[in-house]
Structures are given as C-alpha cells and as structure tokens.
Image (spheres, helix red, strand yellow):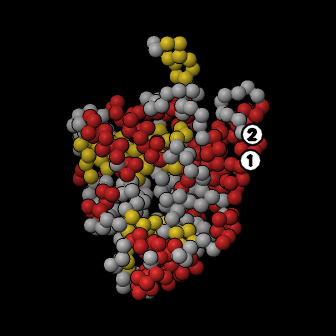
Amino acid sequence: MHRQDFPILKDGLIYLDSGATSLKPQCVIDKITEYYRDYSANAHRGDYDLSLKVDYEYENARDEIKDFINARYREEIVFTSGSTDSLNMIATGFFRQYLEEGDEIVITKSEHASNVMPWFRLAKEIGCKIVYIPLDDNYYVTIENVKRVINENTKLIALAEITNVVGDIRPIKEITKLAHDNNAFVVVDGAQSVPHLKTNVVDSDIDFLAFSGHKMCGPTGIGVLYGKKELLDKLIPTNLGGGMNESFDDEDNVYLKQLPHRLEAGTPNIAGAIGLGQAIKYLKSIGLENIHKHEVSLRKYLVDNLIKIPHIDIINVESDSGIVAFNVDGIFSQDVAYYLNKYHICVRAGNHCAKVLKSATNVANTLRVSLYFYNTKEEIDLLVKLLSDKNKILREML
C-alpha cells in the first residue's frame, strides 16, 4: 500500500518498527529539501519576500494540523520538539500552577515514560498522589475501571489513546466526559494514535493533546501541543527568549506575544514544521480509515500465524491497533531482534519506554512489531517463517 512512495524500501528492507518512528515518503523529503534549497530564511523575523514565504509555509503547516485534528483555532496548535516536549510543557507550564497537595493524578501502568515521568516529578514536588487505573485481563482500560479510581480528589487523567506496547485503544471520549463530570482535566498522549486514527479534539472534548511528527511520516524533532484556547492562555511558557515576546525594557516591563507564538521561543524547527504539514497532506490523501483498516487486517494475519507457533508467547493477542508484542520462549528479546536483523527485518526489542508495565504483565522485555500502511502480508510471511524454527534462531542469533 503506497510502498512506491518510500525510497528506503527499494532495497528489500522489512521495516516493522513504525511505533518508534515511521518511514518518510518522497513528498516529505522533497518538501524539506525545497525549504533548505529555495527559501531557507527564518520565520517571523524578516520583512522581505524570502522570509514572508517561510511565514506562509510555516503557518500553513499549522493550519493543516488544526484541520487534521479538528481543532477550532489556529492558536490552539503549538509546535514543539515532540510528544515528550509537549507533555512536559503541559505538566510544568499548566499543571504545576494548578495542582495542590493531596490532588490525584490518574494514569496507567502501561503508559510511555513521557506520560509518566513528568507526573511523577509533579507529584513529588507538590505532594500529589499518583493513582493507577487497573488494567483488565487483556491489559485494557475500561470505563468501569476508571470509575473505580476517580473521586473528588481526582484533578487530572493522563492517558495514551493507544499504548505503545499493548496497543489497546482507549475510550477517550467516554473517559473525558466522566472526568469533566467530576471536574478533572484530561491529557491525551496521541503519539501512537494520531498517525493511525482520525482525531477530533472537539468531539472528544479533551483538554490537551500531544503528538510527534516522526511517527506519522514526518520529520524527527517536530511535535505538536494542542490545548483548548482558554487553557493554553493560562499555560506559563517554559522557555523564554526570542520570537515569543513583544518587548522587554526591564524585569518589570516584559510583554509576551499572543498564542501560539509566546509558547514557541527561539528559532523554530521550520523545516520540521513544513515537513509535518506535507506529511499530513499525504496521510489525508490516503485516508486514516484506509490506514487503520489495513493495519488491523495485517495484525490479524500476523497474530493468526504467530499463535500457531508453540514457542511464541503473544502478550497482546487482542488489540485493535497495529501493535503486536511477543517473546520467543527461552530466548532474550534482543537476541531475536539481532537474528531478524540478519534478514533485514527491523523490530523493536526491550521494554519500549514502558518500564512500569512489567509489574502488570510480569514480562520485562518483549519483541514488538508495529505495523503501518506500507507493510505487507509477504513481509509477515517471511517474519513468521524465520520465527517458526527455534533451533535456527539459537544457531544464528549471535
């Protein structure tokens, strides 16, 4: 599916690690090159044609993102360096001012480190309590289990819409309604969901959203912080400097720009933003519904074949995303990954930045296949064939 758009695939590479970072289509590569070759000036700094061209392309990318997630206002889209940066800005710039001692922050044990560590730090600094939503037998989050932990002390629920190991899709809209009915905010880590599912921040009514460009066919080093305008207006900038101020005569006379620019200090990642805008146009041309349908079909095909192999233990047999986590009995996950690499197959091995999850699954490390629309059944066939012979793995893994 659209494999011809990805020059890196021309030499037989089998790339099954899109949950870490996706491949880049030629149109995105060309758009980034165009910026560096044809109009490589700064953004919002010059009064000449070249700089005005940059302004147009940069802000056009912001508009593309706004429409892609169905935000109401351009001002609700802030460029960051990635999901991690966005989540830290939300935690430090907004919730550090809002939370008080004894307040409860609700997360799960299957969250990525970027949606755990900022809340750990806040809890320690302020005296808040971290509360975990219990996971069901499939390691899913259910509304019933959210109801079990939410109370008058709950001030924030921070969840990934799709987790990066289990791959479960959370009922974010229902969770948000429950949270708001109990006067709590909702922060969504969309790193694994925005590239794969249609996102509608107005319909879900979430308060904040973070996602990364590099997981959705865009460049590395660019991300997005979405927040409702009235909330972003209260977010204190975590970085100060050029581009985000109107004037500063002395320490008592500092005036900041309006949203979103006051949250984008310094020279931005212009090529990254423009490249992300192009990536979004590309994904829209394919259709998020088509992407998700292909991933789910391919995942079922993979699981149906892996489950027949007696020495394969699948952690998340049931999932509606393109993520499959598994192990080969008695063989360290990294060793299996090295073995597959000999056949130009790229998979992830380790704890996948979800170190708290092991207390729920009792499994510290796994192999992870994360599929995208450019993967095929033929690639899955070769993967399954190579995994089916345990003795071959043992002979060749080092």
* On-image quarter of the N terminus: bottom right
Q: Nearer the viewer, residue 346 or 150?
A: 346
Tell me the residue that label 2 is attached to: 39
Q: Are marks 1 and 2 in contact (CB under 8 Å)?
A: yes
* On-image quarter of the C terminus: bottom left
Residue drawn at x 52%, y 22% is 256
The spot of residue 176 in percent (x, y) is: 38, 47
The spot of residue 379 in percent (x, y) is: 56, 77
Residue drawn at x 46%, y 42% is 86
Q: Is residue 282 left or right of residue 178?
A: right
Residue drawn at x 49%, y 13% is 250
Residue type at mark 1 is Glu
Task: Look at the picture and state if 238 lies above or below 278.
Answer: above
Q: Which mark is residue 34?
A: 1
The spot of residue 285 in percent (x, y) is: 66, 58
Residue type at mark 2 is Tyr
Secondary structure at badge 1 equals: helix
Task: Look at the picture and state if 214 lies above or below 297.
Answer: above
Q: Earlier in the sequence, mark 1 or mark 2?
A: 1
